[in-house]
Image (cartoon, rainbow, N blue to C red):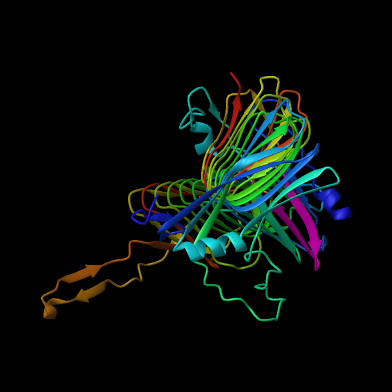
Amino acid sequence: MGATLAFTAAGRDYKVEDRSPVNHTFSSDKKLDVDVISGSVEIIGDGGNSIRVTGERVIHAADQQQVAKAKQDDVLDMNEKDGTAQIYENGPFRNGNNHSSENHGFHEGSDRDYNVNWNLTVHVPRETALHLRDVNGSIKTQDTHGAFDISAVNGSVTGTNIAGSGSISTVNGPTVITFRENPKSDSSFKSVNGKVDVTYQPNLAAEFDLKTVNGGMFTDFESVALASSGDASSKNGKFVYKSHGNSRIRIGSGGPQIRMETVNGSIQIRKAK
Amino acid sequence: MRISKIALITFVCAVGAAAQDKVTVPISNPSQPVTLKVSTMNGSIKVTAGTGKDVIVSTEDGGARLRERNPRDGAPPGMTRIGGGRSGVDIEEDHNVVTVNSGPAGGNGNLVIETPANTNLKLRTTNGSTIDVTGISGDHEIENTNGGIHLNNVSGSVVAHTLNGAVIVSLDRITGTKPMSFTSMNGKVDVTMPADTKARLRLKSDNGAIYSDFDVKLEPDASKPVVEDNRGANGKYKISIDKAVTGTINGGGPEYTFQTMNGNILIHKK
């Protein structure tokens, strides 16, 4: 660390780096809500009975003044209410912070010359329900059993040895999940530019709705093809039927509907070894 | 709501990889003829006369190309490709005009369509193995590129063209005085017409013979050699003569063109 080093963040070279630890313990919440703009998020399920946050804030800035400004602008709000623990990155990039179009008051100049990443590791009781959002950064979950609602934009989403049902999506990056226990209710796994690769337990029984534009679809389960689906409607005297362009298959005796979808990438339904 | 219920009668093949979808398209005015326009890329098209008033469109997974593909091609070790899919079609009905399209990524399915017997057909595929039509009356325009065209017991008028494949047409009845055309590049042209058909035939096969059991009255060769003289510009001097033969049957009528480059032309009396 020092003036001779340059840190590249968001395509810019910053001369100053500032790291500071994050530590927080919530009381006994049942649900975790994480909403960050930049940084990696890792959730680990364990036998504990509280949600414990560790990690660090990493600031890269042009100078110490900008570091101070970053610390003032970009904060991690941690709150809890009605059984939900919330971790929320707040700053001038959020609506209602003097920059949104609805606000017609005096606008603070946007001469921000820094970049902030919140790299967080959160240990949770295994059954904790997860609601995770990240724009620039990857999301990992491990050994969790709760329902999940996970969405990233620029980064991968990885689930290792998880259980539960819900939805997982990203835009730029792969979605790779390994289930220790198969989803019991309808679930979806999506990407746009990345593969969607999900490993299920061999006793899998589900119906799959699959779609990729540029990529193959593969499985090592025995599967039965089902009729693909579409929507029929009648408007202005016209009958219109639009195919969903999907493939549907049943594995085992069928069960919850599982949607796996991407645009540029392959789809893989794997059997756990 | 009623329409969507009727329209989404899908059924499922119980075993195997072939899944089939079925969409019933209600017709705005069932007392009037239907126009059916179908466009696909890699699938065959089969049209038959149904007994009902609706058009029923079924798609089958796996055009010829897809079936030939080894399911392990490009698959990660130990995995197989989930076949088919993308066989979805988009369908629209507007004032008795039914348009069926397989999107660019969706052209792998074969289409099987039932339509009322009075339907004008406009069918087009590129790599479908065949376009097969039975028992439909109307004005038909049929186009294939790498595959044959089989029209069985159709009526009305026909324009049928393919590049690589046979054109086999059997006309029960000819209505109106529209010109017709039956053409291929590499394949035979085999057309059966009612015995009393009145027409002027224009026949041309570059590397094949022309046969008919009609009494064709050949017209004297009226075509004049076309002279291309480019000698003034150091070019060549070229005389070309149109090799087409023209003749009339039953006293003559509208012009019917029969043409192929590599294949015979057969014109049968029904």
Whether the magenta-drawn stretch holds residue A129 is answered as no
Residue B5: give x, y in percent of width and height. 85, 49
Q: Name the main secondary structure of what is drawn in magenta.
A: strand
Residue at the (10%, 76%) spot, across then down: B234
Looking at the image, can residue B148 be seen? yes
Quadrant assignment for the C terminus of chain A: top right
Looking at the image, can residue B201 be seen? no
Whether the magenta-drawn stretch holds residue A236 is answered as yes
Q: Which residues are magenta?
A: A229-242
Instruction: From the viewer's side, name the closer residue of A185 and B73.
Output: A185
Residue at the (52%, 72%) spot, across then down: A111
Above or below, comparing residue B171 to residue A195 in the picture: below
Based on the displayed image, in which of its 4 quarters is residue A181 positioned? top right
Instruction: From the viewer's side, name the closer residue of B53 and B171.
Output: B53
Above or below, comparing residue B237 to residue A71 in the picture: below
Residue A48: give x, y in percent of width and height. 73, 28
Q: Give the residue at the far right of this rendering.
A: B2
Residue B41: give x, y in percent of width and height. 53, 50
Instruction: From the viewer's side, name the closer residue of A221 and B11.
Output: A221
Residue at the (83%, 62%) spot, across then down: B31
Above or below, comparing residue A71 to residue A173 in the picture: below
Residue B131: give x, y in percent of width and height. 57, 47
The mark tally for this picture is 0
Based on the displayed image, in which of its 4 quarters is residue B110 positioned? top right
